Each structure stands twice: as C-alpha cells, then as structure tokens.
Amino acid sequence: MELNGGKVWLVIVLLALGTYLIRWSFLGLFGRKTFPEWVLRHLRYTPVAVLPGLVAPLVLWPEATGGEPDPARLAAALVTLALGCTTRNVLASILGGMATLYLALWILP
C-alpha cells in the first residue's frame, strides 16, 4: 500500500500525539504525587529490565551476520557482563566489551 503525502503526515502527527500523551500520562498526572515505597522499589528496576531487552536481539541475532549468532558478539557480551558485575564500572564494561568485540572480529574468521 502506497501512502500519499497527506496520509504520511497524518500518521506522523498521530504518532507524535500518542507519544506525547503516553509521556504526559506518567509525568503530568503522577509527577507531583508521592508513590508508595513498593512502587518506587519496582520502578528502580525498570532500566535493568529494559536494557537486556534492547541488547539481547543485537547479540543473538545480529543483522551484520544475517541473523546468525556470532561468537565474537557473544564473547563481547559475556566479557561486558562479567566486567560489569565484578567492577561495577560502566565505562570499564563498555570499553572491555568493545575491545573484546574488535579483537574477536580480528582473530576469528
């Protein structure tokens, strides 16, 4: 189905409005309210839950290899995870994973 200019702009405006309303619903409605401790405790884990969901498909089904798992990317992910757990240093984890990826891509066929 081909979209003409008017339909494209309608979709863009509706998506922008939807995104704004989703963000406003949380910040505008609940921004000045005090949450119970159990809600705050659960909200603290949101980034920890979202980040693996964003990274896992890039590691397990990378587009660079046509969707096939790649030993270099798996090794880099494991090194990054290990460095993050042991050092608790985000920069060390990123740099260690990046170095592992480049080294593994250079060494492995």
Image (spheres, rainbow, N blue to C red):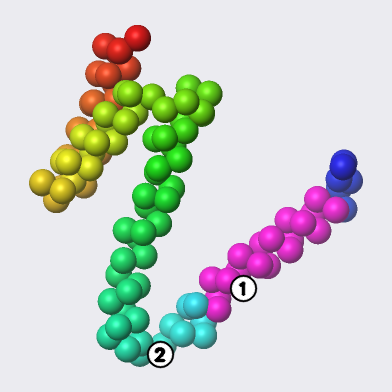
- Quarter of the image with the C terminus is top left
Q: Residue at x 39, y 35 (%)?
A: 59
* Residue 79 position by quadrant: top left
**Magenta extent:** 7-25
The residue shown at (44%, 83%) is: 31
Q: On residue 29, which mark appears?
A: none
Q: Amino acid at mark 2?
A: Lys
Cα–Cα span, label 2 and label 1: 18 Å
Q: Position of residue 75 (x, y in %)?
A: 27, 29
Horizontal side of residue 19 vs 108, given as left or right:
right
The residue singled out by tag 2 in the image is: 33
Q: Is 76 situated left or right of 51 in this image?
A: left
Mark 2 touches mark 1? (CB < 8 Å): no
Element carrying mark 2: loop
Q: Position of residue 42 (x, y in %)?
A: 32, 74
Splitting the image into 4 quarters, where does residue 24 fall? bottom right
Quadrant (top left/top right/bottom left/bottom right) for the N terminus: top right
Q: Is residue 16 depicted above or below 88 in this figure?
A: below
Q: Amino acid at mark 1?
A: Leu
Dot 2 crowding, Cα within 10 Å, few <14, some 14–19, many 20+? few
The structure residue drawn at horizontal position 37% and vertical position 52%, both measured from the top left corner, is 51
Which element type, helix, strand or loop, lies under badge 1? Answer: helix
Q: Main secondary structure of the magenta part?
A: helix
**Residue neighbourhood size for the residue with mark 1, other residues' Cα within 10 Å, grouped as few (<14), some (14–19), many (≥20):** few
Q: Is 16 drawn above or below residue 62 in the view shown? A: below
In the depicted structure, whether residue 89 falls above or below residue 46: above
Residue on which disc 1 sits: 21
Could you say which quadrant of the image residue 3 lies in?
top right
